[in-house]
Image (tube, helix red, strand yellow):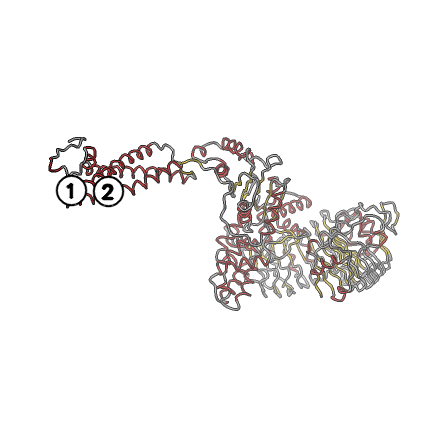
Amino acid sequence: MGNVFSVSISTNDIAGCCDCTAARANYICKLAENRVTLRTELQKLRELKNDVNRKVDVAERQQMKRLDQVQGWLSRVEAMETEVGQLIGDGAETVEEKRLCGCCHPKHCISSYTLGKKVARKLQDMATLMNEGRNFEVVADIVPPTPVEEIPGRPTVGLESTFEKVWRSLEEEHVEMIGLYGLGGVGKTTLLTQINNHFLKTSHNFDVVIWVVVSKTPNLGQVQNEIWEKVGFCDNKWKSKSRHEKAKDIWRALSKKRFVMLLDDMWEHMDLLEVGIPPPDQQNKSKLIFTTRSQDLCGQMGAHTKIQVKSLAWKDSWDLFQKYVGKDALNSDPEIPELAEMVAKECCGLPLAIITIGRAMASKVTPQDWKHAIRVLQTRASNFPGMGHRVYPLLKYSYDSLPSKIVQSCFLYCSLFPEDCFIVKETLIYQWICEGFLDEFDDIDGARNQVFNIISTLVHACLLEESSNTTCVKFHDVVRDMALWITSEMGEMKGKFLVQTSAGLTQAPDFVKWTTTERISLMDNRIEKLTGSPTCPNLSTLLLDLNSDLQMISNGFFQFMPNLRVLSLAKTKIVELPSDISNLVSLQYLDLYGTEIKKLPIEMKNLVQLKALRLCTSKVSSIPQGLISSLLMLQGVGMYNCGLYDQVAEGGVESYDNESLIEELESLKYLTHLRVTIASASVFKRFLSSRKLPSCTHAICLKMFKGSSSLNLSSLENMKHLDGLTMKDLDSLREIKFDWAGKGKETVGYSSLNPKVECFHGLGEVAINRCQMLKNLTWLIFAPNLQYLTIGQCDEMEEVIGKSAEDGGNLSPFTKLIRLELNGLPQLKNVYRNPLPFLYLDRIEIVGCPKLKRLPLNSNSANQGRVVMVGKQEWWNELEWEDEATLTTFLPSFQAI
């Protein structure tokens, strides 16, 4: 019948057909066919919907957003699927009615008509949807990036004050670039994450905050891609552009915005213009913050503010450790909390170590587990779970990034010193020189400068920490453990270091271990004697310092150490050196600081390579005639405050009166650093007349000047390198004089002095002991950089700085002072009459000064609360204060003894 539905209706059927018209009849007639068509078209529509959905999914994976018209179409298609499904079900019911009631039953005719009409209209609607779906050339659009994207990260613990400092700097208009530097694993990335996320919580005037990880081996193209994802659309077409083209696009985009750029984990200087980043300035009001392990990089990048991210304080360390261990483990046994504190302290405030060790201990519920952990961490930390595989490799990046093998060798050398040990820079200078690390310079001054440069490099790489007075450095404990891990596990270094410091040893380790070792440190043990003849063909350094029970080294011990270059016996109880020390033909550094040795053996004449000899504070009182002058290569000699001349008749140099030692010192061609003791006024005069010795003297001890009632210190003004001065046992000394301005006028009063004159610019340490007749030390106003002042057992001392100097003008002594110790000064009434701004002071110790009722302090002298005050409780109770605020400031600082 084609597309036209027609039928002949007899007179008898008129009533049964419900007066159906031809058009209506067509719906009924074509219902079955249309139902089949409906299923087919529905399947086609579903297939088209799936195609569109796939396109949408691909676009959304590229951070695009589906178009509203596409979403509306998909919603209409889903609604259509539901409606068509219902129609298909209704059609099945109608067919069943037709079978039961007959095709012309009135009820069936009506329902078939109704259903047929719906099916025909749905076919038309589906055709419309199909046409719309086929016309979608674009299904999604580029999404404008959110101004700030939240970065997943853990909450900061103990970094709150650093965060506040960074945020305050960020708010200052003149601060455009901030460098955050610190040790690996200390929390720099965590801090930067919190800074990023804080922009989500606070109102600000920036258009966009951009986070980029730079990493150790930066891919500038990838850096550009990450930036462009925040300011443009980073599709494959853009990624294929050259770096120069990308830089231009980024520059154009960022130049129109006020941005915050957060660059994490920078290791080397990055040219912002090469990337396309407009340098932040006062005009664009943008900001840039970066993290790095290198303080030097902060300078290279031009950071206006450099902020160190430091290790956590103990309370914060303990809180973080407890968080990762968990209450179940900590409460599982009464012993565990105390043991847990010991474990936490091994982390020394490094968050990475705290988290790693905390997680490892979370399942440990017996005291034995915790005691074992303490033992492992103290003896072989690399064996602790997570340390050798996660913590140390991360820290080793800093070691790998050091600029040369020489700097790396110097870094590893520091691991020979005990944990928490402050290493004197002067010691490192000579040990590194004598070890042969420094071959760039032939002269000692050039080598010294190189050493200071290396130390600075290590400090700025956050691999060493500098003491407050800058004369010492120390390792962070975890960094030291990493260094020992390198020397014990890494390739060419494996087996070359033997380090057993502070291990409680009573005897030396098995000599078998010494055979291939190059450097041995047994510092800070309880070894009593060293016997035998170890074969050590490669040994170059042997450090035995701080073995306070070590009294004897047997003859023959040094017999087979032909390449030993550095030997330190400092602060041991050694009473004599074995004669076979003469076998150490390569020895260049010999440290006898603080030993019980009284006489140097004549066999030392064979140490012809010796460059540094250190006798300071030792009991050496006898030196064979001609020994010093025979050591032709000596560059540094330390005889400061040693036992020379305490005992005159022991077969050595009888006294300075014969001037023989002065002459021997003068004969040393390469001598540049001298720390010397002088025990008579006549020899002092001879010493000062020398063309060579005053200019290379760094410290001088004046003692036992018999019959000298006055001492003129004007002559010391020519000692440009003088940094230490001790005066002791000068019983008859009443007055210290000074020739003002080189005019021969001895100053009695100080009223005409110019406070800008600095005669002892380098003098950092002064000790005055048992000078019974001295009344004051007013001359110290000429030592503006004095850091340590000790005065003891001076019965007549009334003032440190006399009133005559205070009346002389705008003087401000002791601004660099770090430590002040006053002991046994029964007549002392004043240190200085007016309050002083102690910018660096960290300790005041006062004992046996009953008349000292007032200190030169006010509420501004507390050095931000870091001053510790030590004394008797009775003395403290009678102190008079500038005002109530001063008492309040210093009250928490007092420690009674």
Q: Which quadrant of the figure has residue 319?
A: bottom right
The residue positioned 63% from the left and 41% from the top of the image is 175
Q: Earlier in the sequence, mark 2 or mark 1?
A: 2
Q: Residues within 10 Å of mark 2 (few under 14, many from 20)?
A: some
Q: CA distance from mark 2 to mark 1?
A: 21 Å
Q: Are marks 2 and 1 in contact (CB under 8 Å)?
A: no
The residue positioned 67% from the left and 45% from the top of the image is 449
Q: Is residue 351 left or right of residue 853?
A: left
The quarter in which the C terminus is drawn is: bottom right
On the question of residue 787 being in view, the answer is: no
Q: Position of residue 702 (x, y in %)?
A: 79, 56
Q: Position of residue 420 (x, y in %)?
A: 61, 57
Q: Report the residue that reaches farthest toward the bottom.
A: 334
Q: Which mark is residue 88?
A: 2
**Depth check, front residue: 654 or 153:** 153
Task: For mark 1, give the secondary structure.
Answer: loop
Q: Amino acid at mark 1?
A: His
The quarter in which the N terminus is drawn is: top left
Task: For mark 2, give the secondary structure.
Answer: helix
Q: Which quadrant of the figure has residue 826?
A: bottom right
Q: Is residue 62 left or right of residue 849?
A: left
User: Which label sits in the foreground, 2 or 1?
Assistant: 1
Q: Which residue is mark 1?
A: 105
Q: Position of residue 821 (x, y in %)?
A: 75, 59
Q: Position of residue 135 (x, y in %)?
A: 34, 31
**Depth check, front residue: 408 or 516:** 408
Across the whole image, how many numbered discs are drawn on residues?
2
On the question of residue 764 being in view, the answer is: yes
Q: Amino acid at mark 2?
A: Ile
